[in-house]
Image: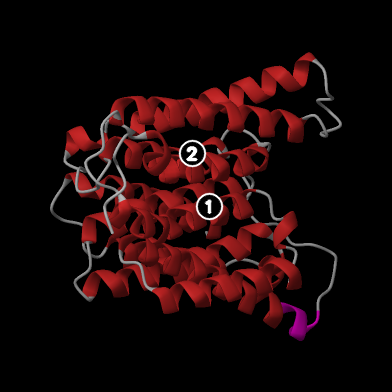
Amino acid sequence: MAETLATLALLSALAMFISPIFEKGKWLASITAVLSLAAFILSPIESIQQSGGSVLVMVAVMCALIQYYINKGLHKKYFNGFGGGITFVLLLTMYPEGGIKETIQTFTFAEHLLAGVESIILGILLAQLLYNSNSFDEKNSLSIIVVFAILLFGSDLLDSGDLLVVIVSMLFIGFLPFLEDKISPKIGSGNGRANALAISTLIGIIFIFATTYALVSNVNRIGDGHGAIAVALWLTVAVTSLGLAGMLLPLLGFDAHPRPEAWGWRFGISISPMVICLQTDLTSNILLGILLALLISISSPLVLEKGSRKAS
């Protein structure tokens, strides 16, 4: 029964993801939260110690907060669509195909409680990052940084694989508005915007490939030969493709930014880790390159565009 409910939660998350196409779907986040919570309740008690049980709690908390923000009048399509996508990725990558199984290992009540609290905090963290990406708040951002640092050094978050990739990807998206707000007031109507976009994008791609190659070369099953080059190229092409697809977003009406095509590129490469982790467990190797590409893209107008800096 738990596996059936988890599957229904996955389908509900998919419905959330595509709901921006339609006008309805206000309560989809609640449905996903209830299904996830019910699946967890019907799972073995030690499921909270496994990725499957942990992700059900995370998703339930995150979707409950998404519903709260939607009811407060925030952007329903954004929260439903983006939240549904995150939920879909988390359930697909962390919930085991064969369902949650009972284990012979025993845990104390304190260990169960600690694991449950950690999962709840992770769900809140993801929801707050989603909120931050829609409406940046400095106090909220400071809390996010503190909580992330505590989890990073006080738990096994570094070993969590796809979960860490999703969180870092959301950190990129959640803090992009902060960096853009710092740079945008300094940008004028400079000449050579197309050249600046092309150059910064090319430099970003080079950084993504170089750092990815350096990191995957240290993976034992790949080595530092032609295999590392092939993997780095494949990952770079995947990131670049999503970034280039993001450049088309202004054609769909997302053109409120000073440099909409550059914003689309940044948005595309920021979400790319969440998409790529559905295919491979090597996604963490692209995160450093994406961070460098984001910084280059944000700062490039000040350096590469002629006369782009506003007069003081």
Viewer-proximal residue among 73 and 93:
73
The residue shown at (56%, 54%) is: 168
- For badge 1, the amino acid type reads Leu
- What stretch of residues is rendered in magenta? 108-112
Residue appearing at x 31%, y 49% in the figure: 15
Above or below for 298 versus 32:
above
Query: Vertical placement of 120 versus 26: above or below?
Result: below
In the rendered image, residue 262, in percent from the top left (x then y), is placed at 34, 37
On the image, the x and y values in percent for residue 104 come to: 85, 64
**Residue drawn at 38 percent across, 66 percent down:** 132
Identify residue type, mark 2. Answer: Ser
Q: Secondary structure at mark 1?
A: helix
Cα–Cα gap, marks 2 and 1? 14 Å
Query: What residue is disc 1 on?
Result: 90
First reached walking from the N terminus: tag 2 or tag 1: 1
Say whether residue 38 is visible: no
- Farthest residue in the top direction? 226
Q: Is residue 223 above or below residue 107?
A: above
Residue in the picture at 27% in, 51% down: 310
Magenta span has 111? yes
* Count of numbered tags: 2
Magenta part mainly helix, strand or loop?
helix
| Picture quadrant of residue 235 | top right
Q: Residues within 10 Å of mark 2 (few under 14, many from 20)?
A: many
Q: Which residue is label 2 attached to?
A: 272
SS class, disc 2: helix
Between tags 2 and 1, which lies in front?
2
Residue 136 in magenta?
A: no
Q: Dividing the image into 4 quarters, which one contains the C terminus?
A: bottom left
